[in-house]
Image (cartoon, helix red, strand yellow):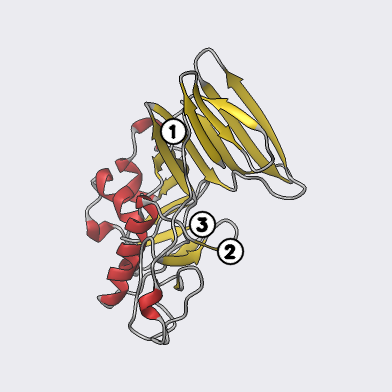
Amino acid sequence: MHIDHDASGLHARLESGETLDVDVIISATGVRPKIGFLAGSGIATETGILVDNHMQTNVANVFAAGDCTEAVEFATGKRIINAIQLNAADQARTAALNMAGRVTRSQGAMALNVLDTFGLISASFGQWQGVDGGDHTELSDETTFKYLRLVFEDDVLIGATSLKLTEHVGRICITLKLFASLTKFFPEAYRKSRELPLEVDANATIDSIIAPLGIPPPLVKLVLLNGVFVPPNERAATRFTDGDALAIWPPIAGG
Protein backbone atom coordinates (compact mmCIF):
# COMPACT_ATOMS: atom_id res chain seq x y z
CA MET A 1 0.00 0.00 0.00
CA HIS A 2 1.18 3.51 -0.85
CA ILE A 3 -0.01 6.53 1.10
CA ASP A 4 -0.40 9.99 -0.46
CA HIS A 5 -1.28 13.22 1.33
CA ASP A 6 -2.43 16.50 -0.16
CA ALA A 7 -4.73 19.40 0.69
CA SER A 8 -7.82 17.23 0.21
CA GLY A 9 -6.70 14.60 2.72
CA LEU A 10 -5.20 11.12 2.83
CA HIS A 11 -5.23 8.70 -0.09
CA ALA A 12 -4.35 5.01 0.18
CA ARG A 13 -3.36 3.33 -3.07
CA LEU A 14 -3.75 -0.44 -2.81
CA GLU A 15 -1.77 -3.12 -4.61
CA SER A 16 -4.81 -3.70 -6.82
CA GLY A 17 -4.47 -0.14 -8.14
CA GLU A 18 -7.57 1.08 -6.36
CA THR A 19 -7.26 4.38 -4.47
CA LEU A 20 -9.23 5.04 -1.30
CA ASP A 21 -9.84 8.50 0.20
CA VAL A 22 -9.61 8.14 3.98
CA ASP A 23 -9.58 10.22 7.15
CA VAL A 24 -7.18 8.04 9.17
CA ILE A 25 -4.89 5.11 8.37
CA ILE A 26 -4.17 2.66 11.18
CA SER A 27 -1.29 0.22 10.73
CA ALA A 28 -1.82 -2.88 12.87
CA THR A 29 0.59 -5.68 12.08
CA GLY A 30 0.42 -7.67 15.30
CA VAL A 31 3.43 -8.93 17.21
CA ARG A 32 6.14 -11.52 16.64
CA PRO A 33 8.18 -12.74 19.63
CA LYS A 34 11.91 -12.08 19.45
CA ILE A 35 13.20 -15.55 20.26
CA GLY A 36 16.32 -15.79 18.11
CA PHE A 37 18.55 -15.95 21.18
CA LEU A 38 17.12 -19.42 21.92
CA ALA A 39 18.61 -20.95 18.76
CA GLY A 40 20.63 -24.00 19.73
CA SER A 41 19.28 -24.03 23.29
CA GLY A 42 17.15 -27.11 22.78
CA ILE A 43 13.99 -25.22 23.75
CA ALA A 44 11.23 -25.96 21.23
CA THR A 45 9.93 -22.95 19.31
CA GLU A 46 7.78 -22.17 16.30
CA THR A 47 6.54 -18.58 16.02
CA GLY A 48 6.87 -18.37 19.82
CA ILE A 49 8.14 -20.55 22.66
CA LEU A 50 6.07 -23.74 22.88
CA VAL A 51 4.66 -24.35 26.36
CA ASP A 52 2.29 -26.90 27.90
CA ASN A 53 -0.63 -26.13 30.22
CA HIS A 54 1.83 -25.77 33.13
CA MET A 55 3.71 -23.09 31.12
CA GLN A 56 6.71 -25.43 30.99
CA THR A 57 8.79 -25.76 27.84
CA ASN A 58 10.06 -29.09 26.52
CA VAL A 59 13.11 -28.59 28.78
CA ALA A 60 12.58 -29.59 32.41
CA ASN A 61 12.35 -26.68 34.88
CA VAL A 62 12.32 -24.05 32.10
CA PHE A 63 9.10 -22.05 31.99
CA ALA A 64 7.84 -19.21 29.79
CA ALA A 65 4.87 -16.86 29.98
CA GLY A 66 3.36 -13.90 28.20
CA ASP A 67 3.85 -12.47 24.73
CA CYS A 68 6.79 -14.75 23.90
CA THR A 69 4.78 -17.96 24.24
CA GLU A 70 2.81 -19.97 21.73
CA ALA A 71 0.23 -21.68 23.91
CA VAL A 72 -2.96 -23.62 23.29
CA GLU A 73 -6.15 -21.56 22.93
CA PHE A 74 -8.83 -23.10 25.13
CA ALA A 75 -11.72 -22.95 22.63
CA THR A 76 -9.96 -24.35 19.54
CA GLY A 77 -7.10 -26.45 20.91
CA LYS A 78 -4.74 -24.71 18.48
CA ARG A 79 -1.57 -22.84 19.43
CA ILE A 80 -1.68 -19.06 19.16
CA ILE A 81 0.42 -16.00 19.92
CA ASN A 82 -1.86 -14.11 22.29
CA ALA A 83 -0.07 -10.90 23.23
CA ILE A 84 -2.55 -9.32 25.64
CA GLN A 85 -2.21 -8.43 29.31
CA LEU A 86 -4.98 -10.74 30.54
CA ASN A 87 -3.31 -13.76 28.97
CA ALA A 88 0.18 -12.75 30.17
CA ALA A 89 -1.02 -12.30 33.76
CA ASP A 90 -2.71 -15.70 33.83
CA GLN A 91 0.29 -17.46 32.30
CA ALA A 92 2.68 -15.72 34.69
CA ARG A 93 0.61 -16.84 37.69
CA THR A 94 0.49 -20.42 36.39
CA ALA A 95 4.24 -20.50 35.72
CA ALA A 96 5.07 -18.99 39.12
CA LEU A 97 2.92 -21.48 41.04
CA ASN A 98 4.45 -24.42 39.19
CA MET A 99 7.98 -23.12 39.74
CA ALA A 100 7.15 -22.86 43.44
CA GLY A 101 6.07 -26.50 43.51
CA ARG A 102 2.30 -25.97 43.39
CA VAL A 103 1.07 -28.02 40.43
CA THR A 104 -1.28 -25.76 38.48
CA ARG A 105 -2.79 -26.00 35.01
CA SER A 106 -3.81 -23.20 32.70
CA GLN A 107 -7.17 -23.71 31.04
CA GLY A 108 -5.73 -22.21 27.87
CA ALA A 109 -5.13 -18.82 26.31
CA MET A 110 -8.16 -16.62 25.74
CA ALA A 111 -8.36 -14.72 22.46
CA LEU A 112 -9.68 -11.40 23.73
CA ASN A 113 -8.74 -7.86 22.82
CA VAL A 114 -10.02 -4.38 23.66
CA LEU A 115 -8.81 -1.34 21.73
CA ASP A 116 -9.31 2.38 22.29
CA THR A 117 -9.16 4.26 18.98
CA PHE A 118 -9.60 7.99 19.55
CA GLY A 119 -12.16 7.25 22.28
CA LEU A 120 -14.05 4.62 20.29
CA ILE A 121 -13.80 1.32 22.18
CA SER A 122 -13.76 -1.87 20.16
CA ALA A 123 -13.70 -5.38 21.56
CA SER A 124 -13.29 -8.82 20.04
CA PHE A 125 -13.04 -12.33 21.39
CA GLY A 126 -12.89 -15.92 20.23
CA GLN A 127 -12.91 -16.76 16.53
CA TRP A 128 -14.21 -13.36 15.44
CA GLN A 129 -12.81 -13.88 11.93
CA GLY A 130 -15.26 -16.75 11.34
CA VAL A 131 -14.75 -20.36 10.26
CA ASP A 132 -15.46 -22.32 7.10
CA GLY A 133 -19.11 -23.27 6.99
CA GLY A 134 -19.97 -20.91 9.82
CA ASP A 135 -22.46 -18.07 9.92
CA HIS A 136 -22.76 -14.59 11.40
CA THR A 137 -25.22 -11.85 12.13
CA GLU A 138 -24.65 -8.10 12.44
CA LEU A 139 -26.34 -5.17 14.14
CA SER A 140 -25.26 -1.58 13.55
CA ASP A 141 -26.35 1.93 14.49
CA GLU A 142 -24.43 4.49 12.46
CA THR A 143 -25.85 7.43 14.42
CA THR A 144 -24.28 6.22 17.69
CA PHE A 145 -21.29 4.38 16.14
CA LYS A 146 -22.44 1.12 17.72
CA TYR A 147 -21.77 -2.19 15.99
CA LEU A 148 -22.06 -5.85 16.92
CA ARG A 149 -21.08 -8.95 14.90
CA LEU A 150 -21.73 -12.42 16.33
CA VAL A 151 -20.03 -15.43 14.73
CA PHE A 152 -21.50 -18.93 14.91
CA GLU A 153 -20.54 -22.49 14.06
CA ASP A 154 -23.34 -25.07 14.12
CA ASP A 155 -25.55 -22.62 16.05
CA VAL A 156 -22.85 -22.18 18.71
CA LEU A 157 -21.47 -18.69 19.39
CA ILE A 158 -17.70 -18.87 18.82
CA GLY A 159 -16.70 -15.21 18.59
CA ALA A 160 -17.80 -11.60 18.42
CA THR A 161 -16.69 -8.10 17.48
CA SER A 162 -18.24 -4.93 18.86
CA LEU A 163 -17.87 -1.16 18.80
CA LYS A 164 -18.98 1.07 21.67
CA LEU A 165 -20.57 -1.86 23.51
CA THR A 166 -18.37 -2.36 26.56
CA GLU A 167 -20.75 -3.05 29.44
CA HIS A 168 -19.87 -6.73 29.73
CA VAL A 169 -16.49 -6.98 28.02
CA GLY A 170 -14.29 -9.47 29.85
CA ARG A 171 -17.20 -10.85 31.90
CA ILE A 172 -18.53 -14.41 31.95
CA CYS A 173 -21.49 -16.11 33.67
CA ILE A 174 -21.13 -19.00 36.10
CA THR A 175 -23.38 -20.73 38.64
CA LEU A 176 -22.27 -20.96 42.28
CA LYS A 177 -23.75 -23.78 44.37
CA LEU A 178 -23.44 -24.02 48.16
CA PHE A 179 -24.58 -27.03 50.15
CA ALA A 180 -25.56 -27.95 53.71
CA SER A 181 -24.62 -25.30 56.28
CA LEU A 182 -22.93 -23.11 53.64
CA THR A 183 -26.24 -21.92 52.19
CA LYS A 184 -26.41 -19.29 54.95
CA PHE A 185 -23.67 -17.42 53.09
CA PHE A 186 -26.06 -16.85 50.17
CA PRO A 187 -28.52 -13.94 50.00
CA GLU A 188 -31.76 -15.20 51.55
CA ALA A 189 -33.60 -15.38 48.21
CA TYR A 190 -31.15 -18.02 46.93
CA ARG A 191 -30.83 -20.25 49.99
CA LYS A 192 -33.65 -22.60 49.07
CA SER A 193 -32.41 -23.22 45.52
CA ARG A 194 -28.78 -23.39 46.72
CA GLU A 195 -27.73 -21.80 43.42
CA LEU A 196 -26.57 -18.27 42.67
CA PRO A 197 -25.95 -17.00 39.11
CA LEU A 198 -22.85 -14.82 38.98
CA GLU A 199 -21.29 -12.58 36.39
CA VAL A 200 -17.55 -12.61 37.02
CA ASP A 201 -14.40 -11.20 35.50
CA ALA A 202 -12.81 -13.47 32.90
CA ASN A 203 -9.67 -13.51 35.06
CA ALA A 204 -11.52 -14.66 38.20
CA THR A 205 -10.30 -17.77 40.00
CA ILE A 206 -12.02 -20.14 42.40
CA ASP A 207 -10.32 -18.51 45.40
CA SER A 208 -11.33 -15.02 44.23
CA ILE A 209 -14.98 -16.14 44.11
CA ILE A 210 -14.93 -17.81 47.54
CA ALA A 211 -13.17 -15.01 49.44
CA PRO A 212 -15.94 -12.34 49.20
CA LEU A 213 -18.52 -14.83 50.50
CA GLY A 214 -16.93 -14.69 53.93
CA ILE A 215 -16.85 -18.48 54.32
CA PRO A 216 -14.18 -19.45 56.89
CA PRO A 217 -11.47 -21.49 55.08
CA PRO A 218 -11.93 -24.58 57.34
CA LEU A 219 -15.53 -24.80 56.08
CA VAL A 220 -14.47 -25.03 52.42
CA LYS A 221 -13.97 -28.79 52.34
CA LEU A 222 -14.99 -30.06 48.91
CA VAL A 223 -14.82 -27.92 45.77
CA LEU A 224 -16.03 -29.20 42.40
CA LEU A 225 -15.84 -27.39 39.08
CA ASN A 226 -18.34 -28.93 36.67
CA GLY A 227 -18.34 -32.04 38.82
CA VAL A 228 -14.54 -32.39 38.92
CA PHE A 229 -12.70 -32.07 42.24
CA VAL A 230 -10.30 -29.13 42.45
CA PRO A 231 -7.61 -29.62 45.14
CA PRO A 232 -6.75 -26.67 47.40
CA ASN A 233 -3.38 -26.04 45.73
CA GLU A 234 -5.03 -25.41 42.35
CA ARG A 235 -7.87 -23.10 43.41
CA ALA A 236 -5.81 -19.90 43.30
CA ALA A 237 -5.09 -20.34 39.59
CA THR A 238 -8.13 -22.18 38.22
CA ARG A 239 -10.16 -19.86 36.00
CA PHE A 240 -13.65 -20.25 34.62
CA THR A 241 -15.24 -20.48 31.21
CA ASP A 242 -18.74 -19.24 30.48
CA GLY A 243 -21.42 -21.58 31.84
CA ASP A 244 -19.24 -23.26 34.48
CA ALA A 245 -20.78 -24.55 37.71
CA LEU A 246 -18.82 -24.21 40.97
CA ALA A 247 -20.06 -26.34 43.88
CA ILE A 248 -18.79 -26.16 47.47
CA TRP A 249 -19.48 -28.46 50.42
CA PRO A 250 -18.47 -28.05 54.08
CA PRO A 251 -17.00 -30.88 56.19
CA ILE A 252 -19.65 -33.43 57.11
CA ALA A 253 -19.88 -36.00 59.86
CA GLY A 254 -17.42 -38.79 59.29
CA GLY A 255 -14.86 -36.79 57.29
Say which residue appears at 34% left-offset and 66% top-offset. 94
Q: Is residue 96 above or below residue 178?
A: below
Instruction: Tell whether 144 sits left or right of 239.
Output: right
Say which residue appears at 47% left-offset and 46% top-offset. 112
Q: CA distance from mark 1 to mark 2?
A: 26 Å
Instruction: Tell whether 27 sits left or right of 161.
Output: left
Q: Which mark is residue 226?
A: 3
Q: Amino acid at mark 2?
A: Lys
The residue wearing badge 1 is 168
For the N terminus, the quadrant is top right
**Numbered disc 3: secondary structure:** loop
Q: How many marks?
A: 3
**Numbered disc 2: secondary structure:** loop
**Numbered disc 1: secondary structure:** loop
The residue wearing badge 2 is 78
State which mark lies toward you, 1 or 3.
Answer: 1
Residue 114 location in percent, x, y? 42, 39
Say which residue appears at 39% left-offset and 65% top-offset. 68
Query: Considering depth in this image, is 197 or 13 the residue closer to the camera?
Result: 13
Q: Residues within 10 Å of mark 1 (few under 14, many from 20)?
A: few
Q: CA distance from mark 1 to mark 3?
A: 23 Å
| Residue lying furthest right | 133
Residue 214 appears in the rendering: yes
Query: Considering depth in this image, is 189 or 246 the residue closer to the camera?
Result: 246
- Asked which quadrant contains residue 207, the reply is bottom left
Q: Earlier in the sequence, mark 1 or mark 3?
A: 1
For the C terminus, the quadrant is bottom left
Query: Considering depth in this image, is 106 or 47 the residue closer to the camera?
Result: 47
Looking at the image, do the residues carrying marks 1 and 3 touch, with CB atoms under 8 Å apart? no
Q: Earlier in the sequence, mark 3 or mark 2?
A: 2
